[in-house]
Image (tube, grey):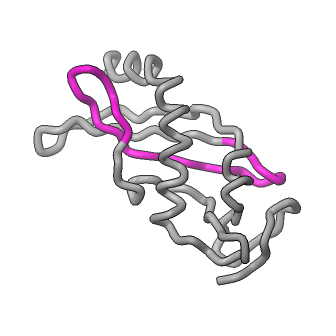
């Protein structure tokens, strides 16, 4: 679907996605919002963390599953484990899909995750 090329001005979309280019995606400032208590399933410990921010006057929400290993937490490598209200668009304004958007966010979240990894590990140990 093509709506427009840039989100320089906030606008409502019918599906509530905030559409951004890759450059605009990198400009979104995210802050750690919360980390859910990890749970064990199939012998693996899984957690869920959400980050929030804003861009062009719109709220941005990004969340991702992570796994707890003996040496600490690690983000999922599956882009479909990323939940967000952002949709990445190409230079023509076409949606790039949830898979490509998830991959782009995973790269960004890895930076946030490693910077907040100690806090996440402390949160995991408390529960």
Looking at the image, the residue that sits furthest to the bottom is 1
Q: How many marks?
A: 0
The quadrant in which residue 4 appears is bottom right
Near-viewer residue (57 or 39)? 57
Near-viewer residue (40 or 18)? 18
Position of residue 90 in the picture relative to residue 70 (left or right) = right
Whole-percent x, y for residue 33 in the image: 57, 34
Q: Quadrant of the C terminus?
A: top left
Residue drawn at (31%, 33%) of the image: 38
Q: Is residue 17 above or below residue 2?
A: above
Residue drawn at (54%, 60%) of the image: 101
Position of residue 92 in the picture relative to residue 41 (left or right) = right
Chain part drawn in magenta: 53-75
Residue drawn at (23%, 35%) of the image: 45
Q: Quadrant of the N terminus?
A: bottom right
Whole-percent x, y for residue 11 in the image: 82, 68
Whole-percent x, y for residue 6 in the image: 80, 66
Whole-percent x, y for residue 107 in the image: 51, 44
Looking at the image, the residue that sits furthest to the front is 91
Is 45 inside the magenta-drawn segment?
Answer: no
Near-viewer residue (50 or 103)? 103
Q: Is residue 6 above or below residue 52?
A: below
SS assignment for the magenta stretch, majority = strand
Looking at the image, the residue that sits furthest to the right is 9
Is 59 inside the magenta-drawn segment?
Answer: yes
The quadrant in which residue 73 appears is top left
Q: Is residue 22 above or below residue 97?
A: above
Residue drawn at (55%, 56%) of the image: 84
């Amino acid at each position: 679907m093509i709506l427009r090329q840039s989100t320089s001005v906030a606008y409502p979309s019918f599906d509530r996605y905030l559409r951004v280019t890759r450059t605009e995606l990198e400009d979104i400032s995210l802050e750690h919002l919360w980390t859910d208590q990890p749970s064990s399933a199939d012998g693996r410990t899984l957690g869920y963390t959400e980050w929030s921010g804003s861009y062009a006057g719109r709220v941005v929400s990004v969340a991702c599953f992570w796994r707890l290993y003996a040496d600490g937490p690690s983000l999922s490598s599956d882009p479909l484990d990323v939940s967000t209200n952002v949709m990445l668009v190409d230079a023509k304004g076409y949606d790039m899909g949830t898979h490509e958007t998830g991959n782009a966010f995973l790269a960004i979240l890895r930076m946030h995750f490693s910077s907040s990894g100690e806090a996440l590990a402390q949160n995991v140990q408390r529960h």
